[in-house]
Amino acid sequence: MEYLIIIAVLAALLAVAVAGLLLLAPRRRRARGAPPPAARGRTGEAGGAPAAVGTLPPATGLPTLEVPPPQAPPLEVPPPFAGRMVRLRDRLARSQTAFGSALLGLLSRDGLDEQGWDEIEDILITADLGVGPARQVVEELRTQVKVEGVRGPEAVRAMLREDLLRQVGADDDRSLRIAGHGDRPSVVLVVGVNGTGKTTACGKLARALVGEGKTVLLGAADTFRAAAADQLQTWGARVGARVIRSDREGADPASVAFQAVAEGIEAGVDTVIVDTAGRLHTKTGLMDELGKIKRVIEKRATVDEVLLVLDATTGQNGLRQARVFAEAVDVTGIVLTKLDGTAKGGIVVAVQRELGVPVKLVGLGEGPDDLAPFDPRAFVDAITS
Ligand SMILES: Nc1nc2c(ncn2[C@@H]2O[C@H](COP(=O)(O)OP(=O)(O)OP(=O)(O)O)[C@@H](O)[C@H]2O)c(=O)[nH]1
Ligand SMILES: [Mg+2]
């Protein structure tokens, strides 16, 4: 009899345990956000739905997830990347912030006096050209006016255009190094201060490259807050670019970057773009973090571009912060965002001088295709029209 009671108690306990496990299992799966493991592959292929989903092998010991967007929207087809810079003229005209037009007005005056030249220098300094370059432009213009005389607005415009082009660096190499390395993708690391437009730039660049027929994978190495990875995912989903992210906030950014590159190699994509967090902590902290991300990526691939994102509207102050980043990591190009609607276009010249690297891309608005390869001629045309 006792024997039977013990068996009945054990059976009841077993039943409770099994029921508990059955209840908990689906909840745990939901919490991790991971759908059932499926075959991996490129998203956005046939049918346009991000088909590939699953937990990635934790190459660095940390769990990372590749999560699909909640609802897969139809894939968009971005317009060509080249030639977008002409939009700047419209944007500046609408907000009447092209500093060039004020300069033209002054220069077209007959017989500029000392005060007139000072005004010209002030306009250039206010436009964030920097004191040195502003003086240089004024000196060059003064000499030209003295030697050649001012002959109507068109001649003045041509003169100003040439001087500004020289300052901007008309013939510098601004091409993105994204040619790839045989079977390995090119890697673009995006860094910069909070809120400058890093994640947006990653998303817009991914779109532009997809529009050019390239395959792109995004790495959400801003693990500081989950919203950053969500933001990147929204961008990726629109053009079918996969996003590698961590399943927990505060994960090691280097680990996510490594995982993204490893996945990019495995999937055979053309380019991996890695977004980072923008907290400006101490220079040492920054150096450690960015240095580690770069070192870890370089275990598997070459970091071809380190793009420093800078907000054009923050002027000289933004420049100071950018300098800290440039000291922490070897920057190969600048992405100057929010150039739309700012009179501070002179920052193009100042930042190139200060950091010794060319502006390669510019942000011209909040629209998904408002990122353009920087074209010095179109830029100078826009600010002097
Ligand atoms: N007008 C305009 N707005 C821009 C441009 N680029 C980015 N923005 C806006 O700037 C804001 C910040 O952009 P994010 O991409 O989130 O900036 P972030 O550097 O990733 O920010 P953190 O991740 O917080 O460091 C967003 O509202 C963007 O829409 C641009 O070229 N023009
Ligand atoms: Mg961001």
Image (tube, rainbow, N blue to C red):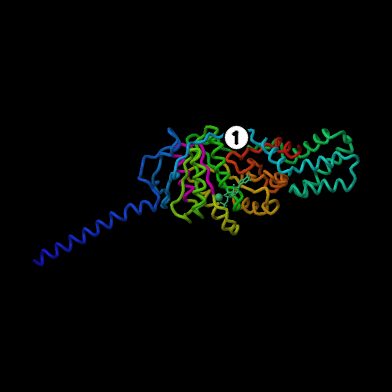
- Position of 206 compared to 104: left or right? left
User: Which residue sits furthest front?
Assistant: 94
Q: Where 79 falls versus 142 (above or below)? A: above
**The N terminus lies in which quarter of the figure?**
bottom left
Look at the magenta stretch and give its main secondary structure: helix
Q: Is residue 264 magenta?
A: yes
Residue 40 appears in which quarter of the rendering?
top left
Tell me: is circle 1 under 8 Å from ligand 1.
no
**The C terminus lies in which quarter of the figure?**
top right
User: Which residue sits furthest left?
Assistant: 1
Label 1, residues with CA under 10 Å away: few <14, some 14-19, many ≥20 = some
Q: Position of residue 355 (x, y in %)?
A: 67, 48
Which residue is at a point 67% across and 47% down the rendered structure image?
Answer: 312
- Given residues 294 and 8, the one toward you in this image is 8
Q: Position of residue 145 (x, y in %)?
A: 87, 38
Residue 96 appears in which quarter of the rendering?
top right
Q: Amino acid at mark 1?
A: Phe
Q: Is residue 232 magenta?
A: no
Circle 1 SS class: loop
Which residue is at a point 36% across and 41% down the rendered structure image?
Answer: 38
Label 1: which residue?
Answer: 81
- Given residues 342 and 327, the one toward you in this image is 342
Q: Where 70 falls versus 385 (above or below)? A: below
Which residue is at a point 31% across and 56% down the rendered structure image?
Answer: 24
Q: Position of residue 39 (x, y in %)?
A: 37, 39
- Position of 327 compared to 40: left or right? right
How many numbered marks have been drawn onto this rendered protein structure?
1
User: Which residue sits furthest bottom?
Assistant: 2
> Which stretch did the figure color magenta?
255-275
Q: Position of residue 13 (x, y in %)?
A: 21, 61
